[in-house]
Image (cartoon, rainbow, N blue to C red):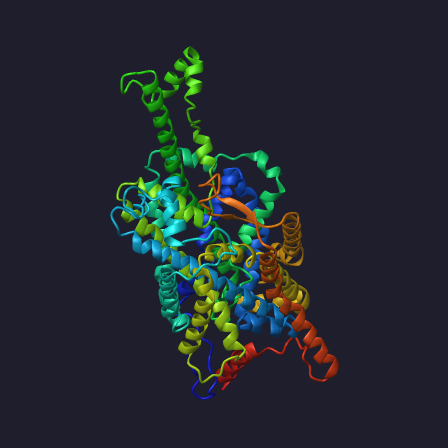
Amino acid sequence: MAETADSGVKERAKWDNKAQYLLTSIGFAVGLGNVWRFPYLCQIYGGGAFLIPYLIALVFQGLPLLYLELAVGQRFRVGSIGVWKSISPLLGGVGIASMIVSFLVCIFYNTILSWVLWYFFHSFQNPLPWSQCPLNENRTGYNVECEKSTPVNYFWYRETLNISTDIETSGSMHWWLVVCLASAWCVVYICFIKGIESMGKAVYVTATFPYLVLTIFLIRATTLPGATDGLMYLFTPKWEILKNPQVWLDAATQIFFSLSVAFGGLISFSSYNPAKNNCERDAVIVGVINSATSIYASIPIFSILGFKATNVYNSCRMENILDLTNHFELAEQNITLENYDQWFDHLNSTYPDQVASLKLRPCDLQKFLDQSASGTGLAFIVFTEAVIEMPGSQVWAVLFFIMLFSLGLSSMFGNIEGILTPINDLKLLPNWIPHEVKTAIICMICFLTALLFTLSSGNYWVEVFNGYVGSVPLLIIAFFEIIGVVYVHGMKNFSDDIYFMTGSRPNIYWKACWMVISPLMLLVVFVAYVVVQAQKHPTYPTWNPNYDEFPETKVIPYPDWVFGIIILLCVVPVTSIPLVALYRLIRRVRSPDRGDLNNYCNEGFEIETQEQNNRRT
């Protein structure tokens, strides 16, 4: 961050080079959802068929929003609050809403990274701790809860989370989770201690390393037994599923959230660009790479899912082979995996009553492939279970969790930037406080708030925040962003701004999306989402060893008081939008000569004007 010698005006920090900016933006956009949410949606929504609504949403909703945020950030050269306040003081609440959402996302997102650290630390053990059940207290057998479920489930729910039976049973804080959470926040602070100066160096690793690991996994996973079945499952489209409106709704929300628009981080990142920069090309590069990463990550993920499904399928048939061999007193090795179907058909046609009495397990590869999981279930249960069967399992576990941590860390940079930059631009903290101290204060507040997630009920609260903080509020914020730029700032003014920055005006595609298509899609998605959620009382899965169908999770409705908190998480972040507008209108009525509603009252241009004067001098 430089300072002009003759004016004393503090210049806005700048990226060392274009690569830093692009890597940071890509790292913010490409997060954990690309690895564990997108493959899940492909799995439940017809494989390749899901790509059609996904790409449509990318073209008409994702890219226009991304371009708009990068453009306004670069032109006004301030954070999210400063941008919308500059366009119109009435819109100041939009930036505040983005900052609040970024804060709420920060506290639960870094909790997930603390879980990743916990698994990473345990990945060096041989054998892996989730590969076998521990002994019971008397050391006379294995732990009963583990035997009823699986070692992988037990390590996740009991050893890691020590989870309670429902969200109302809070329990106590677990020291190992507190230590991991503190470690995760220390890493974030160290990388962010100098702002974009230190963060710009960190993204060279955090934004590129996941692609290296994904490529290594791609090469290894495609050579595993059953990988072909997994890939066929991914790329075989089920066209009839496109008739389901939920598919289109989930595609629109996925592309919207995966690009990380409306958080304020992208606006802050682009504000560090020079005034003359092709932000249109940047938006296309970031958007395309983000979506391509989702598809690229799906290939090794589905290869491993196919490998896991094949192992379960073969284990199921081996159990049946053992039952048939013992019952009919056949010689060992008579029935093998290769001739199992022929033997079963023969015995079933010859001795149908005896075969029926054995109650053999139904073994269907397609059914095992259909068993879907997303989020923490995919990362900490499905994938860890598959890793156990892979040769050199410790190596693959270490690589996988380093990749997840790098993905999450890059996204955390954008979330922290979405908090710090508005605070600095609004001068909410005194200028004499060093940037390092300001960052430390924000990280400490987030850490203390996130201690909620280290309780026995912490995982349930993470699911609440994950499911509702990043849904309705972001849709509302994005809608007001487009309205603010196109209809308050004006399409002509915005077109002039883009011409100033890029040397060319936006084409008909961008204008049509900004003026009609994108706001209309956002409105439709918002209404559809609210209608879908309003039709049912929200429920959540619980881990209860006393449940009759254990180890299946018991799905129960949220208590009324938790449901009230869910409503608050959806409403409170965006209440600043009408409140700030109302406050400005009241001030205008009381002091009509103040000029509060001057669209061109933009402090963000002061530095630019000063630089121009210096050049003329």
Front in this rendered view, residue 173 or 465: 173
Task: Report the label total.
Answer: 0
Front in this rendered view, residue 8 or 471: 471
Residue 483 seen in this snapshot: yes
Left or right: 99 in relation to 411 = right
Could you tell me residue 504's position as x and y percent?
56, 63
Left or right: 125 in relation to 598 = left
Residue 284 seen in this snapshot: no
Q: Residue 393 appears in which quarter of the rendering?
A: top left
Q: Farthest residue in the top direction?
A: 350
Q: Residue 579 appears in which quarter of the rendering?
A: bottom right
Q: Quadrant of the N terminus?
A: bottom left
Front in this rendered view, residue 230 or 534: 534
Could you tell me residue 72's position as x and y percent?
56, 67
Could you tell me residue 195's position as x and y percent?
41, 72
Could you tell me residue 521's position as x and y percent?
64, 52
Q: Is residue 377 above or below residue 181?
A: above
Left or right: 57 in relation to 449 = right
